[in-house]
């Protein structure tokens, strides 16, 4: 985010003490109290001081019989690896298979055909051979996918593109799936096959409202053809729907239990209440109050940022780093309502730590950059 | 040695299950026991708030049930008392995302790690309740002494005896000795008369509970509160120590407390 800041020693006083692995036989009650005491007095109640939760797993071994080996807590807790290096089933809790209705391993083309729970009429693989039509056009490539098992079709698509040996490379693809009702995973599958061959899945055509919804949810541009009448609904979720630098705009409040998870960056125009979760592979910006959990760069990008007008998240995650809010006594009652609104804040990663700063100071030309 | 799994349930909502679980869990931990609390109220989780651990949750019960993380990774250590851990519920999922078998499997593992596993059941007698009861060795009924809470508690006891063959223990919550003395509230004996189960403890009503719960600081950690002793007593009884019931009859105490 701010490459120039990396050398900036001034930053360190705003950051937390690095989490050093603690002895597990020590007294348990440490965590926050420790770092708070080490900070200068005037910093102690600043809400922009966040700490990473490297200690979360630390104490768990106290409970265990120890048979399973030691928990080694690194200075950074990777979200997607456990301490024995066992790769976990998913890169992170959001983009894992949770919250997705049909999950049976549809990501890999060679997985069991049972994966396509919502795929169209099931026929033999042979019938599907002619089901894929690839045509080059002036504006790009048109791929029509007919009937057949989705998984098998994806394998064929893979083979067909292989044969074409890069002929279409770099082209924009219009993907026509007809009346087939596709889930987000199945669309994802198609997209990954296309990207594998350097194709850009630019537009999806369908007559199925279900597919239309899935495409919207996965951030694809999509056209819904409503039968012979020729009525067309086109939805372009963002300027460019492929990269993470486009935005998904959510208007309204996110309440406890709501999860908004997108490939693109998320812009919420509204409040994010405690208990709500945001996850994006890009940035997260909240024009309103951020009080829930926000995970930017959920696929691992640590250059992602999280910003909000009122910055009070329960927990922040950027890439594989996690930070929690300082355990402040919640203020209640009338006395706590301050007259001046707090400044907008932004969180980003500097030297493997999540730093939260007033936007006023973090922006180019702000104090954090100038004081060198 | 394998631990004991205790589920707190009530039928009716709002009688103080979560507060009771949080406080008894902390009390047991204060007695030196290894305790894991499990929030079975998937979709409407609260136990993390009452324990003040919300911002430390990374993985939850559903992550464990679906095999994304190992159980130990999902346990959130308490920040004040050693040997107390929380397995939080998922807020973005719902009750049907976990089956009783998965709960039993998770609790079987927890039993090996802890002396006591306390499960906070959701209100009601549906799926979430079944999940919470399935793994239980003991069941703790939390109720207040008002007529609707007692009616629901009675129904739950009936279900427990019919379907699960469990004899639950009773925690009578928000007991107001002043009202009992002037005859407008059922006393302990009246309640036991109706429910006819063993009494685990009586927790007196205290408006400070609202404050401590809201801050995420369990009342049992606050030495000034009378409820602290009530929770500690229940913890003692759970560990097998026979401690006498608190006495509420002394009028002087309440007068001192309220200053009138």
Image (cartoon, helix red, strand yellow):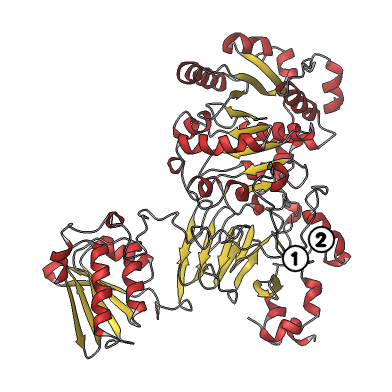
Q: Which tag, 2 or 1, sits closer to the chain's start?
A: 2
Question: Which residue is found at the position 69% from the left and 41% from the top?
Answer: A65
Residue drawn at (29%, 77%), measured in percent from left and top? A203
| Chain hosting mark 1 | A
Q: Which of the image's four quarters has the C terminus of chain B?
A: top right
Which label sits on residue B164?
A: none
Q: Chain of mark 2?
A: A
**Could you tell me which secondary element the residue under label 2 belongs to?**
helix
Instruction: Give the x, y percent position of residue A36.
Output: 82, 60
Quadrant of residue A72 within the rendered picture = bottom right
Residue A366 in view of the camera: no
Estimate the x, y position of residue B46 in percent, counting from the top left: 60, 42
The answer to whether B85 is drawn above or below residue A186 in the figure is above
What residue do we see at 27% from left, 57% from top?
Answer: A113
Residue linked to disc 1:
A49
Residue picked out by circle 2: A35
How many other residues sit within 10 Å of disc 1, few (<14), some (14-19) or many (≥20)? many
Q: Residues within 10 Å of mark 2 (few under 14, many from 20)?
A: some
The outermost residue toward the bottom is: A138
Considering depth in this image, is A252 or A369 the residue closer to the camera?
A369
> Is the residue B166 above or below the residue B61 in the image?
above
């Amino acid at each position: 985010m701010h490459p120039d800041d990396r050398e900036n020693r001034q930053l360190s006083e705003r950051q937390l003490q690095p989490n050093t692995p603690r002895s597990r036989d020590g007294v348990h009650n440490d965590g926050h109290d420790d770092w708070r005491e080490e900070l200068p007095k005037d910093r102690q109640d600043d809400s922009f001081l966040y700490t990473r939760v490297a200690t979360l797993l630390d104490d768990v071994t106290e409970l265990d019989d120890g048979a399973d080996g030691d928990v080694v807590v690194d200075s950074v807790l990777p979200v997607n690896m456990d301490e024995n290096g066992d790769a976990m089933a998913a890169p992170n809790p959001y983009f894992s298979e949770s919250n997705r209705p049909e999950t049976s391993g549809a990501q890999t083309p060679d997985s069991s055909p049972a994966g396509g729970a919502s795929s169209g009429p099931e026929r033999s693989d042979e019938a599907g051979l002619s089901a894929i039509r690839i045509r080059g056009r002036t504006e790009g490539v048109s791929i029509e996918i007919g009937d057949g098992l989705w998984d098998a079709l994806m394998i064929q698509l893979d083979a067909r593109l292989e044969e074409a040996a890069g002929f279409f490379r770099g082209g924009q693809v219009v993907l026509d799936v007809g009346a087939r009702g596709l889930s987000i995973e199945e669309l994802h599958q198609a997209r990954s096959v296309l990207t594998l061959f350097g194709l850009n899945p630019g537009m999806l055509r369908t007559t199925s409202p279900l597919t239309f919804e899935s495409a919207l949810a996965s951030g694809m541009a999509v056209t819904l053809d409503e039968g012979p009448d020729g009525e067309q609904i086109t939805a372009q979720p963002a300027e460019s729907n492929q990269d993470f630098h486009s935005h998904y705009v959510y208007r309204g409040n996110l309440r406890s239990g709501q999860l908004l998870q997108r490939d693109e960056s998320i812009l919420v125009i509204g409040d994010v209440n405690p208990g709500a979760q945001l996850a994006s592979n890009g940035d997260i910006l909240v024009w309103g109050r951020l009080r829930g959990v926000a995970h930017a760069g959920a696929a691992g990008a640590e250059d992602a940022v999280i910003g909000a007008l009122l910055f009070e998240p329960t927990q922040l995650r950027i890439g594989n780093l996690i930070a929690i809010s300082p355990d402040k006594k919640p203020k209640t009652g009338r006395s706590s309502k301050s007259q001046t609104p707090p400044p907008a804040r932004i969180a980003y990663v500097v030297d493997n730590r999540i730093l939260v700063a007033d936007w006023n100071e973090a922006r180019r030309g702000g104090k954090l950059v100038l004081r060198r | 040695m394998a631990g004991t799994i205790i589920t707190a349930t009530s039928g009716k909502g709002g009688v103080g299950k979560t507060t009771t679980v949080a406080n008894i869990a902390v009390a047991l931990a204060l007695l030196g026991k290894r305790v894991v609390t499990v929030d079975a109220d998937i979709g409407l989780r609260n136990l993390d708030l009452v324990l003040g651990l919300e911002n430390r949750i990374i993985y939850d019960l559903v992550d464990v049930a679906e095999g994304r993380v190992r159980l130990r990774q999902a346990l959130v250590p308490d920040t004040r008392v050693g040997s107390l851990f929380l397995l939080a519920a998922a807020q973005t999922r719902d009750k049907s995302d976990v089956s009783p078998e998965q709960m039993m499997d998770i609790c079987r593992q927890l039993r090996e790690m802890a002396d006591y596993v306390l499960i906070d059941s959701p209100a009601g007698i549906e799926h979430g309740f079944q999940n919470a009861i399935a793994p239980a060795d003991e069941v703790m009924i939390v109720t207040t002494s008002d007529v609707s809470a007692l009616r629901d508690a009675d129904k739950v006891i009936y279900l427990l005896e019919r379907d699960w063959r469990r004899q639950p223990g009773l925690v009578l919550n928000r007991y107001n000795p002043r009202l009992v003395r002037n005859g407008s509230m059922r006393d302990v004996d009246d309640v036991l008369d109706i429910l006819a189960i063993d009494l685990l403890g009586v927790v007196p009503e205290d408006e400070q509970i609202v404050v401590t719960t809201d801050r995420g600081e369990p009342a049992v950690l606050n030495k000034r509160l009378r409820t602290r002793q009530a929770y500690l007593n229940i913890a003692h009884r759970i560990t097998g120590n026979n401690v006498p019931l608190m006495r509420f009859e002394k009028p002087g105490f309440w007068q001192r407390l309220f200053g009138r």
